[in-house]
Amino acid sequence: MAQGGNVRKGFTIYLLILFFIILAGLLGCIVAMLFSPFTNILGIQYYVYNYREIFKETDAGQAYNLDDISVINVDTNSANVTLQRRNDVDQFYIEFTTTSKGFAKGDQNTDFDHYIEYDSTLDTLNISVHEPEGFIRFENNVNINLLLPMNDASEDFDNIDLYINTNSGNVYIGNNATDNLNPNFKYDTKIKNLYITMNDGSLRFAENSTNEFENLRINIGDGRVTSEKNISFSNSLSINSNSARFDLANLSYTATMNHNMHINLNLDDSIFYADTINGNLNLNMRGGHFIVDSIEGSINSNSAITQMSNGKITIGSVAGNISLPYANNSDITIDSMTEGSQAYIHATGGNITINSLKGMAWLETTSGKVDVTTYSDGLEIITTTGAINLVYDVATVSDVVLKSNSGRINAFVRSNLSCVMKFHDKDGIYYDDDNGPSTVNLILHDIGFQNPAIINNGLDENSMLFYSDGRITVDLIETSNI
């Protein structure tokens, strides 16, 4: 028995010795790779770069003159792209930098290459880099910097179409700070047309970017877009996103708008926040959250193909019309709609809230709840099982219809309202019971159930129509000063 134990103990020691030999060999290989970068050892190589170079002219010795360039294309995989002004340049420069290191397979391309090429017309400049490939990246900081001087206002991109295509790189437009010691320096940057395509990077319009474009198009997957100042455009703004987050200031047209000019927002499951939007919107989203403090323009949303599902729309004020025909199981909240505005919203399980309506509205949902305070006539609300809560702060009625199969209807009206109220079941059958059905509760000047109920000598053409098998309650509010 003792001999068997010694055999096992000896075998364990042998395995430990073998393990340490293998570990020492691996460590030796790693040390060799660290001291001999780019050497293929056992099918693995270590790469390292610490590189910075500025290019002022073509290979033929000609300076990059922005007056001769109409298009700049920048293509990267994970490199960052920056357009900014710097006080250490005196003309348009292109800078490449990289601090990269990591491990790669022996057959992976670890070269860092950059290219600046004119096309055959000599008015299009193509800029690209090849970032080192690897399966372990300790650092991967690759940058393409488009640099403009601070002391020359004529150097700008105001006649250039700038295309930036990147997969996971970040894009920075403009300077974030100014130099108080040099107030005459020019910090803002201008771009005629900006077209950005990125997957999961970040796009930032800095404090000192002008953000005035003819056309601006942003295609982004899952990333973030921020702007520290207004974004304006004379022709078009188009944003396409899967699930990015947007934190923007103001979006607005600089040209006089017409009915054919729309801001196109295809947001899918994104989170979109903006302070104000001045312009008509084509808004398409499935889920996500759309939050805007103020919109001056109309909103047309979604189609039968792109329908909302579990999304949220939250808007402060709207001076225009709203059309949301496929809101489905999404919540819509609007704080106020101005005089002359119109809202058409169709949902299923989502809730609809308009806190201050001074226009007309047609609202319909299935199981969702509808809450509306209106200061204007012209209103139709339809639910199946959802509740209807209406504050009708108007002195007369011309066209108000409230329908629910089984949901409760709560209507609050002004004490000086002049109208005729007519009550029906969900199928439109007129209630004619002298004592009234138990589901109808009128708290109006201490009158009992009447059908029709003539309020303040209202005329028949001023009728408020109720349809429901659920409970109907009509109560009073104080007369508004609005």
Image (cartoon, rainbow, N blue to C red):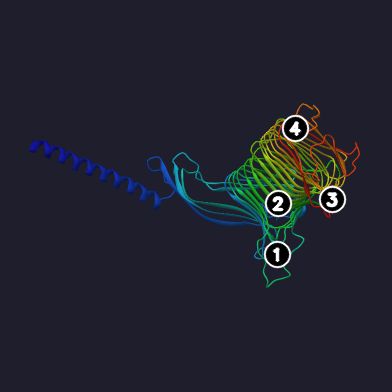
User: Mark 3 and mark 4 in contact (Cβ < 8 Å)?
Assistant: no
Residue designated by label 1: 150
Residue at the (61%, 57%) spot, across then down: 54
How busy is the neighbourhood of tag 3: few (under 14 within 10 Å), some, or many (20 plus)?
few
* Amino acid type at image mark 1: Met
Tell me the CA gap for discs 2 and 4: 49 Å
Q: Earlier in the sequence, mark 1 or mark 4?
A: 1
Residue designated by label 4: 437
Residue at the (18%, 38%) spot, across then down: 11
Kindly tell me whether residue 105 is visible in this rendering: yes
Q: Earlier in the sequence, mark 3 or mark 2?
A: 3
Camera-nearest residue between 152 and 119:
152
Q: Which mark is residue 274?
A: 2
* Amino acid type at image mark 2: Ala
* Amino acid type at image mark 3: Ala
* Amino acid type at image mark 4: Pro
